[in-house]
Image (cartoon, grey):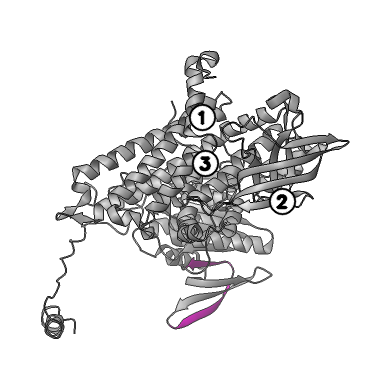
């Protein structure tokens, strides 16, 4: 079974994000880049499916500039067999739909039976690409999955997704797209052997033209970014407890209008 | 001079850092308090390839280099000094000599399981009267047909209790003094080989330090590493490499304590401002940052020389000396930055301080490193004190 995993390189979760000089993007200077954590669940699950079936191929795909190679190599170190890097200045301003179109074109070429994504990237938290991709391909799709089982014949997948109060279970015919939620698995650390072997694995560079795609104006434009306003300082209510509680209740009701 | 790590080295560093943060740091306090060998995490380190980093894949290892080893040990030591020494002993003091001096048959049997992290190895050179004076070996290895009979005691052996394989040094020819020392691999469970004591220590308490006893312990001649009489050369060459590992451990301990001191200096207030705004505290942090970077660079240089196949003994001695002294000073000052809280176990910097002390002692005391360096500076004969 061939499985394709779509991953995105994002700033490390510990990054102190600053608005860039143009006011439309973040300042990327000094940022440590990582594979988006939800995408790591997707990679791990793909590797587990392959290991369980004893055969198959896991292909990692990512769209972005040169620096994305590092994230791709992390996935190869974890155990993906090869990778495709969608790297073209035409995609510099790619929105989710442009990204989904590029991925859909790759998927048509590669013809995997299963596509795994993270439920959303942790940078802009759009969570849109998986659904757009399913729509473009006309494939069934399940979001926020916590469990999955591919049947022995590789004809369908049973996926359980997080719903309020329990799990919602779906049977999807393959090919299908699944988006991983936290809890699906515990991603492995790359072993040293995996890391040392990653460089020998293929990363294919693909341009928009290779997929028959031209430069399209994005459907979504960023008008501007603003930093969050600083949090106002808290207030400590002094005095003896009965009076302080009274004041607290008054403040919550009248000032904060919270109760 | 190349100062950037390769992609692989950076990935290994990142993996070691994440593993140390998520798997080791949460148990570091407990295993120190209980002086408990961390079997579970050591096994996982083995599976990740951290226990045989420089050994080629053919012999069960990871096929990475000494620089990768150094950055990985530092990351592990930032979280826990005990894990770092367990790792350093396995990589430098056991796998390295087995790879360098072992025959293919010996590598297959004694190296593959240890480099792959399925078993641990230890290095048994020190005796009660043979520490810095390592030539003064009293353990006897008497040839008897196809085997040797070992009699003697080894002291302060790191991982001595937990190791499945011990690289043991003993006299095969007393008359030749240190030219009569030979090296043997002895398997745990061999009749006549026992662990008589585990030491209760100031620091690195989760790494076991044991006394090994050999009483008429019969070792097949096929388990002799190198030729008869090569033991001392093997031991000294091995320790040169080991010093790079301990230097990396010392850098990690210093850096771990320093990171906590910086965090505390930002958050703790006195006289109405964070203490990091006081010049006295800034002074200490600046000194720590500078010394740690210097120690790290010396360690990386020694590792780079070793990887290039160039002489690295003096570079390793300098790295180990400077890193160990830096670890002691930085961990002392990290407690100072924390004030009274630093003296309390809950704040952890005191553990770094206790762990740091041993780096000035094992694999050659700071004084022995100076001797090695001075001999190089003055020339062998002029530098000899006796």
- Identify the image quadrant of residue B128: top right
Q: Position of residue A168 (x, y in %)?
A: 50, 80
- A159 is within the stretch colored magenta: no
Circle nearer the N terminus (2, 3) = 3
Q: Mark 1 lies on which chain?
A: B
First to last magenta residue range: A165-180
Q: What secondary structure is marked by label 3? A: helix
Number of numbered callouts drawn: 3
Q: Residue at x 32, y 44 (%)?
A: B333
Left or right: residue A22 versus residue A5 is: left
Check the picture and name the quadrant holding the C terminus of chain B.
Answer: top right
Q: Position of residue A83 (x, y in %)?
A: 54, 49
How far, Cα to Cα, is label 2 from label 1?
30 Å
Circle nearer the N terminus (2, 1) = 2
Give residue B8's mark.
3
Please name the residue that numbered disc 2 is placed on: B194
């Amino acid at each position: 079974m061939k499985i394709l995993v779509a991953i995105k390189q994002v700033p490390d979760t510990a990054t102190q994000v600053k608005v860039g000089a143009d006011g439309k993007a973040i300042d990327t200077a000094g940022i440590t880049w990582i594979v988006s954590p939800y995408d790591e669940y997707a990679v791990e699950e793909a590797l587990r499916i392959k290991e369980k079936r004893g055969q198959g191929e896991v292909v990692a795909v990512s769209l972005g500039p040169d620096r994305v190679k590092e994230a791709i190599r992390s996935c190869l170190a974890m155990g993906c067999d090869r990778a495709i890097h969608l790297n073209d200045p035409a995609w510099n301003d790619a929105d989710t739909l442009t990204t989904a179109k590029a991925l859909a074109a790759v998927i048509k070429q590669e013809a995997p039976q299963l596509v795994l994504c993270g439920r959303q990237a942790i940078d802009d938290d759009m969570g849109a690409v998986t659904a757009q991709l399913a729509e473009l391909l006309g494939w069934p799709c399940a979001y926020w999955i916590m469990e999955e089982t591919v049947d022995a014949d590789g004809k369908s997948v049973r996926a359980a997704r997080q719903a309020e109060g329990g799990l919602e279970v779906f049977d999807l015919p393959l090919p299908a797209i699944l988006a991983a939620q936290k809890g699906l698995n515990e991603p492995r650390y790359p072993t040293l052997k995996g890391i040392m072997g990653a460089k020998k694995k293929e990363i294919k560079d693909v341009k928009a033209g290779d997929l028959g795609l031209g430069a399209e104006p994005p459907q979504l434009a960023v008008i501007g970014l603003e930093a969050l306003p600083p949090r106002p300082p808290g207030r400590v209510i002094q005095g003896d407890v009965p009076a302080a509680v009274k004041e607290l209740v008054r403040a919550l009701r009248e000032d904060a209008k919270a109760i | 001079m190349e100062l950037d790590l390769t992609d692989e080295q950076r990935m290994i560093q990142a993996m070691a850092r994440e593993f140390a943060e998520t798997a080791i740091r949460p148990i570091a306090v407990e295993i120190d308090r209980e002086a408990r060998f961390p079997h579970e995490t050591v096994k996982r380190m083995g599976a990740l390839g951290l226990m045989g980093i420089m050994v080629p894949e053919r012999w069960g290892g990871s096929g990475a280099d000494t620089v990768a080893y150094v950055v990985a040990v530092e990351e592990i030591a930032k979280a826990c000094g005990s894990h770092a020494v367990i790792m350093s002993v396995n990589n430098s003091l056991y796998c390295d000599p087995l790879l360098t001096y072992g025959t293919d048959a010996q590598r297959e049997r004694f190296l593959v399981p240890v480099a792959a992290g399925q078993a641990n190895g230890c290095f048994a050179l020190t005796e009660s009267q043979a520490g810095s004076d390592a030539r003064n070996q009293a353990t006897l290895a008497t040839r008897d047909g196809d085997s040797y009979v070992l009699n003697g005691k080894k002291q302060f052996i790191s991982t001595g209790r937990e190791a499945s394989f011990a690289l043991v040094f003993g006299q095969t020819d007393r008359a030749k003094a240190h030219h009569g020392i030979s090296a043997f691999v002895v398997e745990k469970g061999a009749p006549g080989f026992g662990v008589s004591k585990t030491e209760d220590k100031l620091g690195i308490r989760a790494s076991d330090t044991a006394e090994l006893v050999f009483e008429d312990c019969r070792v097949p001649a096929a388990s002799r590493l190198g030729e008869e009489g090569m033991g001392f050369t093997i031991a000294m060459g091995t320790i040169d490499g080991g010093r790079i590992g301990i230097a990396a451990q010392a850098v990690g301990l210093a850096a771990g304590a320093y990171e906590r001191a910086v965090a505390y200096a930002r958050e703790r207030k006195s006289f109405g401002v964070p203490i990091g705004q006081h010049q006295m505290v800034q002074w200490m942090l600046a000194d720590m940052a500078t010394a740690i970077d210097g120690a790290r660079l010396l360690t990386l240089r020694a590792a780079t020389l070793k990887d290039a196949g160039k002489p690295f003994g003096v570079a390793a001695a300098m790295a180990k000396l400077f890193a160990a002294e830096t670890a002691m000073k930085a961990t002392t000052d990290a407690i100072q930055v924390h004030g009274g809280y630093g003296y309390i176990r809950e704040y952890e910097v005191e553990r770094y301080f206790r762990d740091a002390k041993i780096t000035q002692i094992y694999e050659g005391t700071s004084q022995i490193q100076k001797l090695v360096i001075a001999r190089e500076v003055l020339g062998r004969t002029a530098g000899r004190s006796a």
